[in-house]
Image (cartoon, rainbow, N blue to C red):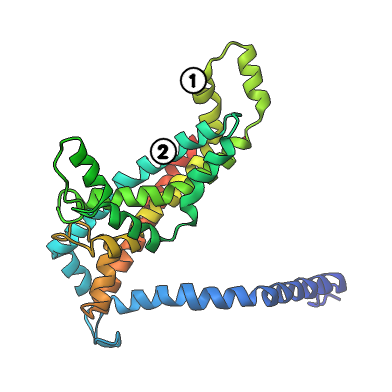
Amino acid sequence: MKTDTLPPKRTSANKKKWKNLGVGLLYLSPALIITGIFLFYPMFRTLYLSFFVTNAGGTPVSFIGFENYTMLWESATFRTSMSATFLFALYTVPTTIIISLFLAVITNEKVKGIPFFRVVFSSTLGVSVAAGATIWLLLFHPSLGVLNNLLNAVGLSGVQWLTSPNVALISVAITTIWMNIGFNFIVLLGGLQNISEELYESAKIDGAGYWTQLFKITIPLLSPTLFFVSVVTIINSFQTFGQIDILTGGGPSNSTNLIVYSIFREAFYNGYFGYASAQAIILFLLVLIFTFIQFKVGEKKVHYQ
């Protein structure tokens, strides 16, 4: 006679599986709770607010659907912010990676005194955004700044680094490049030091010169690290805030009003939390799209050992 009861062994195995799941979730619960409170809740709250008009305290007042997104589409100020954001990423991402790679390659050589230069090149990693921006604020000063004094010394007129709409974004980009070099340099140097010396020795025996080794061995084997650095640098470029706030405050004429700073200004200066939330969702989608493209296109060119 057939019965619907499970065999004892299968029943005990299922109980053990559920027990292990419960124990695993118990250990993970602190991390899950923290992630839920500080990551998922703000994200869903932002999406929720983007469909509402809010009061000055951020409390939803009336549901307006996609009207905030429609206003963004029609806003010339928002289009200027988007344009400035893309230009800023174009200025900072390739330049930061190229300079960091160059510094990592030259400091990977076995030369006496190289550890000192490694410390110097990575030192910006220990400088906060506020401190770094303040340093460059002094350098960019129109009359007391070192940069204009150097230009005057060679007979050139000074530049309005932070007050000219044509130069301000470039000035902020220079500051950002300087601050990001330290992290990228350390990551790329670590990747270079993981490449086996035997490959270079074999290449030398075969008659390969320095440049052949660089483009046939170093760059291909460093591609996973370069891919990681490029993804992180692009994301950071879209999230730049501190140096904008200290150096230019989004001006002049909104030329440095990147989308992150626009979100901050609309929410905390103007009190339009719903409008700012819509911008935040668009920024999230932009970062998601760029990251997806990098993984779909860039990862195909990565050579894993």
User: In percent of the image, x 50 and y 78: which residue is there?
Assistant: 37
What label does residue 211 carry, if any? 1
> Quadrant location of residue 286?
bottom left
Camera sees residue 304: no
Side of 216 relative to 180 (left or right): right
User: In percent of the image, x 34 and y 63: which residue is there?
Assistant: 242
Q: Position of residue 235 (x, y in %)?
A: 40, 54
Of labels 1 and 2, the one closer to you = 2
**Residue 74 or 112: which is nearer the viewer?**
112
From this view, report whether residue 64 is shown above or below residue 216: below
> Quadrant location of residue 263?
bottom left
| Quadrant containing the N terminus in the rendered view | bottom right
Mark 1: give few (<14), some (14-19) or many (20+) Cα within 10 Å.
Answer: few
Q: Which residue is mark 2?
A: 99
Give SS at disc 1: helix
> Quadrant location of residue 3?
bottom right
User: In percent of the image, x 58 and y 74: which residue is there?
Assistant: 32
Q: Position of residue 25 (x, y in %)?
A: 67, 74
**How far separated are the C-alphas under marks 1 and 2?**
17 Å
Camera sees residue 145: yes
From this view, report whether residue 27 is shown above or below residue 211: below
Q: Position of residue 143 (x, y in %)?
A: 19, 53
**Residue 305 or 138: which is nearer the viewer?**
138
Q: Position of residue 71 (x, y in %)?
A: 16, 69
